[in-house]
Each structure stands twice: as structure tokens, then as C-alpha cells.
Image (cartoon, coloured by chain):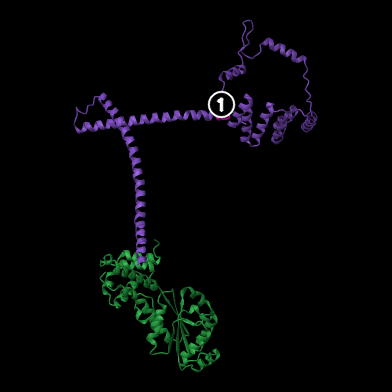
Chain colours: A purple, B green
Amino acid sequence: MHKVKELENKWFNYKVKKILSPLIAISASSLLVVGGYYIYLSQEDKLHSLISSTVSSSTRATSVLGVSRDANNSINNLQKKEKVIEKIVDKKVLEEKIEEVKLEKKLEEPKILEKIALAPIIPVIDMAKEERIADVKRPRPVKVSRNTVAAKKNDYLTAKELAVVRRTQKREKVVPRKTKKMKFTSSDSNYFETMQHKFSKSNSPRDALLLAKVYYKKAEYVEAEKWALSANKLNNSLEESWLLFAKSKVKLGKKKEALKILVSYYKKSQSIKAKRLIGQIKTGKI
Amino acid sequence: MMSSNYDELKNIFVDVVDKSAYVELESATYNYDVLESSLDKPLKMVLLYGKPGTGKSMLLNKLYHNLKENREIHYFEAPILSEKEFLKSIYEGMSGQVIPERMRVNFDGLLKYCQKLKNQREIIFLLDECQLYSEPLMEKIRLLSDTRVVKFVITLHKTENEEVIAKEHFKTRIWEVIELCNANEYDLEVYIQKKVIKKGFVDVSNSIKKRDIKFIHTHTNGNFRETNKYLYTIFDIYDYYEKNEPKKISSNKFSRKILEMAAIRLGYINA
């Protein structure tokens, strides 16, 4: 007898569970739906308020245009008004959107500036300096003095001049020039040997740098890199060693490494050459 | 539910292998016909197999009771696990003599006895729960069936079937295989209704609706033993309410609450 009572309790619990579990599921899902709908409504309200504000401004605009709602009650006029309002609303909404975008852009600008500041290359060109350099290179116009005799306009010799030339031609016998053959022997290997020998004795960073330069010219970039590095090890303030090392790296396809090295060097030294080289590497000129 | 003696009702579903408890179902009738006709064929062994509670023992029991008047048929309801006792029972069944306690049957002698009876007699032995028999004893059953004087109808649980079938001595000798399955919803309804009506509870039978049968079927999978157990529990709870809180079972409907309570008690529902 007692067992049946116990069983009844169990059954009651089971029923409660059975009824409650779908109820909980339904309530949870409905909560989600209601929540979602509430969010949607809040957004909708925002939109409505935006539109209403624009509509109020548009009504002002319509009054400017001379269109009065009270004056005209006909359907056509109303439709026209609505169209006008819609256009104005659209314009207003568009304008506001543009403003928002501008604001966003403004907000984003400092970020962009930060990015530029963080960038290893600062592409700032000193225009005044550039112009000065250009001025130096530009051929200066030759000042024509008034005393100098103007050249003849044509190249033809006069009869007198021709007579002089013919006379001198007769006097001088034309002796054919003998071509001299010169033997140029490549002294590259000797040069490297001697330089390396010299370096081993002197242990001078200049010698190492010279070797690096020669190797770079000969497009032996691995060697150039090696010698530039050894020069740099001996004297790390030697700017050329940095540049040459980076250039060799670029030639060996290690562009990122080269840039990293150069940027670190630029930060330390503020060298213009380094900066220029960074630019060249970035633009792919090297 | 009309007022009824629930104590009597629940006892209808006490699981017993009894001729009176047998319910004629379409599927059971078909299986019975197959089984009976297979006994007329020159088969050495007939295998009756299925999951526990599908009605194998009941079918065997019915076969025995139906044929015992006309044929030489012996039914070993419980498996005789001792070889000595088994051979003694076979001989006693065949000869009709009672062997004294201290005597034992020699298997070779039994075989010779069987061979002597060839073409004279055909004795059927119905062996239930054969999965419990030992391997050497099964071998002896095989040899006895080879004499064609003794025919065996054996029942096996389906789980053991594949293993036993694979054995050589069964492979060659089993000619007829009858598989018993769980009842479908329709058969289950008929089974419950027939059982209840047989005892005169027509109103109870009418109160059990199709949806109740469906509910019972989902929990018992149409297994007769499980269904008996379930219905026994249901009527046991009814019995309690009738005696203690009769108001709770005043309706004419089969109470879903009691169905669920019984399911909880039997562990069908995890509450």
C-alpha cells in the first residue's frame, strides 16, 4: 500500500517534469523572440524618430516652397506634397548619412595617422630641397656678352676660307693612324685575394666594406652580405655597411629582413640615406 | 472502468505456461500450423526460436496438448541438465517403464533400442530451453535423432541461435526453423482483449482503447511476457485503488495515470 503512494509521488514528479520541461523550453524560446522583437522595435523607434525629425524639417521646407497643407486639401496636391516630402526626407537622410560617414572618417583619421607614424617609411619629400638640387643640375643659361662675335648662321665656308683649307691639305700628308692593341687582364681574383689578405692583416672595417662593395657590384650578394656584416661588426656606426647589408639582403630576396634592419638603423641614426633606401626597397626600385 | 475484481484480473496476466493461457493469434496460429505440419515430414529436428517471451514455450505446450492423444509425444518443460537423468527420461518416455532410482541408462544400449524400433514407431520429444543443454548432451540428442525413431522439437533463445546453428551437428539436422517474433499492435490488442474476455471481463476489454494499446506496445515492444508483467502491474495498482481510494478510478476509461505509474514501477519510464 505504501509502495503505491510512493509510486504516485514518483508519477507526480514525472508529470511535473514532463509538463515543465516543454514549458521551460517554450518560455525560453519566447523570451528570445520577445527580446529580439524588443531590440528590433527599439531600432525601429530610433529610425522613426529620425524620420519624424526629418519630416518636421521637410514640412518647414514645404512652407518655404509655398505649399501649405491647410490651403490645399485635394488628393493630387497631397500626393505631390508627399512626393516632395519624400524627396526631402531622402535628401535629409542622405545628408545625415554622409555626415555620419564623415564623422566616422574623422574618427578613423587619427588611427590612420597612427598607422603612418608607426610605418617604417615616412614618405615626406622636402620640395624646397628637391628644387635646389634640380637648380644645381639644370644647365645655367650662358650669358652672351655684347663683345663676342656672333657665329655664322650657315656652315658653309666662304671661298677665301676654302682656299686656305685646300692649301694646308696639300702641305700635310695624311699619315694613317696605327691602331694599338691594348691588353686588359682581369685582376678581379687578384684584387679579392689582395684585399682579403690586406683585411686579414689590417682587420679594418673599411677594407671589409670595400670588399662588400666589389662583391655587390659583381652581383655576388651572399659574399657582399657577409663582408658588409663583418664591416658592421667591426664598426657598427659605418652607415655604408648597414646600407650594403640591407641591399644585399634585398637582392637575396629577404626584403622583409632588409626593411627590418634598415628601420631599426633609421630609428637609431635618423639617416636620410637609410630612409631613402627604405623607400626604394618599398617601391621595389631595388 | 466498470467495477470489477481487479485481483482476479491481474491474475489473468500471471506468466504461466498453460494450455488455458494460450491465446489464438493470427501469427501464433500460423506458426503452430507450420510446426504441426513439420512433424509429419521426415525431419530429424525442428527448431523453434525467438526472443524470450515471444511464446515459444506456450506453442510447445499447445502442441503437446493437442497431439498427446494421437501421437507418441513427450514434453520436457524444464531442461534436464543431467545426462543420466536425460537418458533415463528418454528411455522412460519410449518404453513406458519406470527405471529404479539406482539404475542408469546406457547410451549405446539406448541407441540399439532405438534402432530396433526403426520403421515401427516415431516418438516426438519436445525440449524447451535447449540453450541450457551441454554440448555432449546435444551430441547425444543428435545421435538419437539420426536413428529416425526419435524426433526432437527444440526451442532456443534467438541470441543463442546463431551460435548453435553454426554447430555442425545442428546444421545438417535442423530442417525446419520457425522464428517467433514479438506481437504488433494489432496482435497485442487481440491478445489482451481475448485474455480479458476469456475470464468474462468484457467491460474491461471495452475500456482499453487503441491509444492505451499503443502506449503498452511502446513499452513492451509487443513481447508477451513483458505485456503480461505490465498488465499485471496495472491491475495491481487498480486493485489498490479499488480497495483504498475507489474515487480515483471511478471513470470508465483506462487510466493513463495508472498506465504511467505501472511503467514507472517496471522501469519503462525513468521518473
* Of B19 and B26, the residue lying toward us: B19
Predominant SS along the magenta part: loop
Q: Secondary structure at mark 1?
A: loop
Residue at coordinates 28% horizontally, 65% vertically from top-left? B248
Label 1: how many residues lie within 10 Å, few (<14), some (14-19) or many (20+)? few
Give the amino acid type for the residue marked by disc 1 in the picture.
Pro
Q: Position of residue B235 (x, y in %)?
A: 33, 70
Q: Is residue A48 left or right of residue A222?
A: left
Callout count: 1
- Quadrant position of residue B8: bottom left
Give the magenta-colored segment's residue range. A118-123
- Quadrant position of residue A42: top left
**Which residue corresponds to mark 1?**
A123
Q: Position of residue A171 (x, y in %)?
A: 77, 14
Quarter of the N terminus of chain A within the rendering: bottom left
Residue at coordinates 72% horizontally, 32% vertically from top-left? A230
